[in-house]
Structures are given as C-alpha cells and as structure tokens.
Image (cartoon, coloured by chain):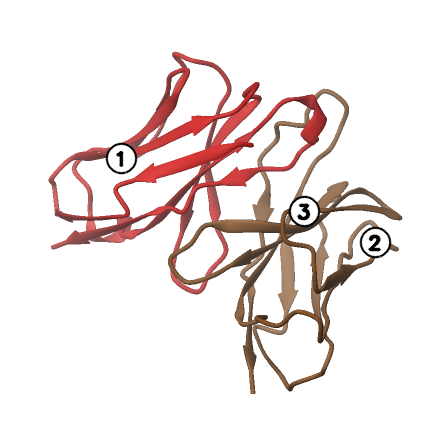
Amino acid sequence: DGGITQSPKYLFRKEGQNVTLSCEQNLNHDAMYWYRQDPGQGLRLIYYSQIVNDFQKGDIAEGYSVSREKKESFPLTVTSAQKNPTAFYLCASSTNRQGSSNQPQHFGDGTRLSIL
Amino acid sequence: EDQVTQSPEALRLQEGESSSLNCSYTVSGLRGLFWYRQDPGKGPEFLFTLYSAGEEKEKERLKATLTKKESFLHITAPKPEDSATYLCAVQEGETSGSRLTFGEGTQLTVNP
C-alpha cells in the first residue's frame, strides 16, 4: 500500500544526545514536511522540502536539522540544542506539480519523543 | 502573518445531535483551506479541500463550507465513531509555496 512510514513510533533522548527520526514515503510525492505537535495544540512547521537536495526552514527550525538526499526520504535530527524536544513529530508529503500546489498533505502516524 | 483560529476548543455531543465547528482565518490570499481528522496517537487524515467562497464539500455525515473569512464543518446526526480532533489549515498565496498553517483543533466527543 502507498503511504508514509515514520519510525520509530516511540523514542527516548538522553541529555546532550542527538536523535534522528525517519520518514519514508512511496507516494512519489515531491514535497515533504516535518511538524511538531504539543498536547492540545495544532501543528507547527519545522522544515519542509519541495524537491530533492533543497529544503527550507519553517516556523520553529531552531535545534533541528534535515536532509533530502532521496525523493522518498526526509529524516529529521533533533539536536542537543533543542531544549524542549518532548513532543509528537509528524511527517507529511504532497505532490508539487506546477499548478497543483494546493494539493492536500498526507501524514504518517508520528513519532513520540520523550526525554529520559 | 497568517492566523487560523478554531472554535470551540472542545465539544461534547449526544449521538444524533447535529452541530458545527468553526475555522476563521486571516491570510493575504487564500489558495486552499483543508480539513483533517486526527485520532489519538495518529497522524491527521485528510477530509476536504475548499478553494473559493461559496464552495461546499460533503462526505457521509460531514459537510464543509467556506466563506471569505471562515469555514464551517457541519456534523449531521453524529455517531460515537466521529469522536476525534478536527483540524483546519490554510494555504496562502504564491510566496509560501505549498506550506500550510494549522489551527489548534476542535476536540469532538460524541456520547452514545
């Protein structure tokens, strides 16, 4: 089945440690996104990529890094500089064909990150 | 700066009791308004896209409408399985590409 796979489902980080969240899609979508969701709040954009080897900062990029070396993969690294990393992280993708930029984003089932 | 405000924050309904959720927005040029459903511990599931004022979309017990300043998600004769958080998001004009701005959601509970 086509879709977006996020792993792991749960992740624990120690103080001073970097951790990487995986996001893979087989929908052949050009654009991919990372969001953070805190309890009772909406989604806030961390980073997004509209094409391979290119990405842009979202609203809360500090303490995070990404790469986009392959169309189907968009890993997110939560660095030790992110002082409050406990949250639910969601990855999404969408088509990005010319003239179709208002296509919906489709989401994975998230990774819940906690501090040990 | 884009703003998306959803109300109410939480809504409790009895099974069969119809109601509406509101999403008001301020953007410089709306390219699309999206409704999603999110179950606990899951990612949002796409429901509807609305592009212009006056547009309506329906799916089972849900109907989404759009004006120049707000969107409503009408729920007719809801069932307990409609319990979820409903999120709306807007896509602004050309300069922001395909990024979305989300509201904080309305948590809907339907009691049997």
Image marks 3 and 2: residues in contact by CB distance under 8 Å: no
Q: Residue at x 69, y 55 (%)?
A: A61
* Residues behind callouts 3 and 1 on a single chain: no
Look at mark 2 in the image and give the residue it sits on. A68
| Chain identifier matching the red colour in the rendered picture | B
Instruction: Provide residue A19's location: percent of width, then percent of height.
Output: 71, 76
Q: Residue at x 43, y 28 (%)?
A: B25
Instruction: Provide residue B85's location: percent of width, then percent of height.
Output: 35, 50
Look at mark 3 in the image and give the residue it sits on. A58
Quarter of the N terminus of chain A within the rendering: bottom right
Instruction: State whether residue B95 appears in this view.
Output: yes
Mark 2, Cα crowd under 10 Å, few <14 / some 14-19 / many 20+, is some
Q: Residue at x 67, y 33 (%)?
A: B98
| Subunit under mark 3 | A
| Chain identifier matching the brown colour in the rendered picture | A
A77 relative to B31, above or below? below
Q: Amino acid at mark 3?
A: Gly
Mark 1, Cα crowd under 10 Å, few <14 / some 14-19 / many 20+, is few
| Subunit under mark 2 | A
Look at mark 1 in the image and give the residue it sits on. B61
Q: Of A60 and B108, which appears nearest the observer?
A: A60
